[in-house]
Image (cartoon, rainbow, N blue to C red):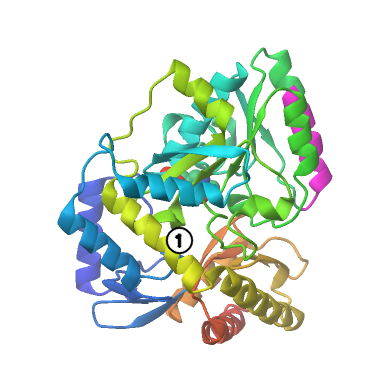
């Protein structure tokens, strides 16, 4: 409708060149040319508030990160089979944030590769081949990570060695019972359980913060499997409570995968695990990933750790996340369209419901697009796609919270039917 000719032309060229596998956000897709902090700008300098992007985690175009990238790019960027001090520094710094039992980290470029590697290593370590994931999980796009992603391939299309369990919301007991049943089924089918993969904020299951994983992890351990915390969404301080999402669950995972926020947009991700697991794998197999931890990616990743600490962004995630949660709860009191609000730091889920309290996917989509028209970015997720997913860059501040909540109040009023 409101699209100008040049945007329509770009969309057409994109479809012709890239084909039909992609989806753009919004009925009227957006094109940004620059960003700074929590803001994005179009070519004619219209400003949007970014409440969605967790990759530029320490803020769009953070000067310290861009400088680290530029400086390193002007010196050297190679594959990863020469000695390079910065990559070892990075590994040591990252391991210092993880539980002491997790003593090795292997670098990849994407979260998908990290989960693919995690499955490969878990199979090597356990001698089992099965995997358990939640029903709407997303763990990546490679053949193996895609097999762990019913939200990508469809629930019907999951591989026979994968079992789906109900997400722990609304019923945490159904999750535990599901894990118990899945273990029994995988054992009966001869696969056994190599790993339970859990996104520790359950982003694609509708954002489920909490502290309920211990019994499931105990069951998996008793069955000889590993618990793998997928920290691609929750990691690097977003939940406002230390570096990692599993901290909230008070568990020590056997392995951790991470990605998205690690390089603030540079492709760096990885897999960390207890020493014996990675050493066993390394005694039987080799691993080489051309771009996994190049000097430029690692320069960005080290700068991200510096900025997280120096700017106190984990504390900010907690404080600003709490403020946003409080504002959303007051809005929910006035507005029957908001059902449950779930929050952990700067990861929030807002359920959009109809007059009877049932998921209202159509209205959630209208709200996402209405927020776009009010120049605020977010998206929807979950079983019925009725949960607004809010996960801004971590420097999100109190003024951003007010701008976000007033845009949401307006949009809810405008979508009232
Ligand atoms: N795990 C989770 C929980 C994710 O959200 C994603 C990406 N959305 C991935 C893994 C895959 O990461 P990537 O897109 O970098 O391959």
Find residue 160 and report its image quarter: top right
* Residue 345 appearing in the image: yes
Q: Is residue 63 left or right of residue 90?
A: left
Q: Is residue 94 above or below residue 150?
A: below
Residue on which disc 1 sits? 305
Q: Main secondary structure of the magenta part?
A: helix
Q: Residue at x 54, y 20 (%)?
A: 124
Above/below status of 41 relative to 386 = below
Task: Tell me residue 210's x, y (percent).
Answer: 74, 56
User: Which sits in the foreground, 75 or 128?
Assistant: 75
Q: Quadrant of the C terminus?
A: bottom right
For residue 176: magenta?
A: yes
**Region of the chain picked out in magenta, as a range:** 170-183
Q: Residue at x 56, y 85 (%)?
A: 398
Quadrant of residue 304 within the rendered picture: bottom left
SS of the residue at dot 1?
A: helix
Percent x, y of residue 141: 43, 39
106 relative position to 313: left or right:
left
Q: Nearer the viewer, residue 10 or 279?
A: 279
Q: Determine whether, in the image, residue 359 is placed left or right of residue 395.
A: right
Quarter of the picture holding the N terminus: bottom left
């Amino acid at each position: 409708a409101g699209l100008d000719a040049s945007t329509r032309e770009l969309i057409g060229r994109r479809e012709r060149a890239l084909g039909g596998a992609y989806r753009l956000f919004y009925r009227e897709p957006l094109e940004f040319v620059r960003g700074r902090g929590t803001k994005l700008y179009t070519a004619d300098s219209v400003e949007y508030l970014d409440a969605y992007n967790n990759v530029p985690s320490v803020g769009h175009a953070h000067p310290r990160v861009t400088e680290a990238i530029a400086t390193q790019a002007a010196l050297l960027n190679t594959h990863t089979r020469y000695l390079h001090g910065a990559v070892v520094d990075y590994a040591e710094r990252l391991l210092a944030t993880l539980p002491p039992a997790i003593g090795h980290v292997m670098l990849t470029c994407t979260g998908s590769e990290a989960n693919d590697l995690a499955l490969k290593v878990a199979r090597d370590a356990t001698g089992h081949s099965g995997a358990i994931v939640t029903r709407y999980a997303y763990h990546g796009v490679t053949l193996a990570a895609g097999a762990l992603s019913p939200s990508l391939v469809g629930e019907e299309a999951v591989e026979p060695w994968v079992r789906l369990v109900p997400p722990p919301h609304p019923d945490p007991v159904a999750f535990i019972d599901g894990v118990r049943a899945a273990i029994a089924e995988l054992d009966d089918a001869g696969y056994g359980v190599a790993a339970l993969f859990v996104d520790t904020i359950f982003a694609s299951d509708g954002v489920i913060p909490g502290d309920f994983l211990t019994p499931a992890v105990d069951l998996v351990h008793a069955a000889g499997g590993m618990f793998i915390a997928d920290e691609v969404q929750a990691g690097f301080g977003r939940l406002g409570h230390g570096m990692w999402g599993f901290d909230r669950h008070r568990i020590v995972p056997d392995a951790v995968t991470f990605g998205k926020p690690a390089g603030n947009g540079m492709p760096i991700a990885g897999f960390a695990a207890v020493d014996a697991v990675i050493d066993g794998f390394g005694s039987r197999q080799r691993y080489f990933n051309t771009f996994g931890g190049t000097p430029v990616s690692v320069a960005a990743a080290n700068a991200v750790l510096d900025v997280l600490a120096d700017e106190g962004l984990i504390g900010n995630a907690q404080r600003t996340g709490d403020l946003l949660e409080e504002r959303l709860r007051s809005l929910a009191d006035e507005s029957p369209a908001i059902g449950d609000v779930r929050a952990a730091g700067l990861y929030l889920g807002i359920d959009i419901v109809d007059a009877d309290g049932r998921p209202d996917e159509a209205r959630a989509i209208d709200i996402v697009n209405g927020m776009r028209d009010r120049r605020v970015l977010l998206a929807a997720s979950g079983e019925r796609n009725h949960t607004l997913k809010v996960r801004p860059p971590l420097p999100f501040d109190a003024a951003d919270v007010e701008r976000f909540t007033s845009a949401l109040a307006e949009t809810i009023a405008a979508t009232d039917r």
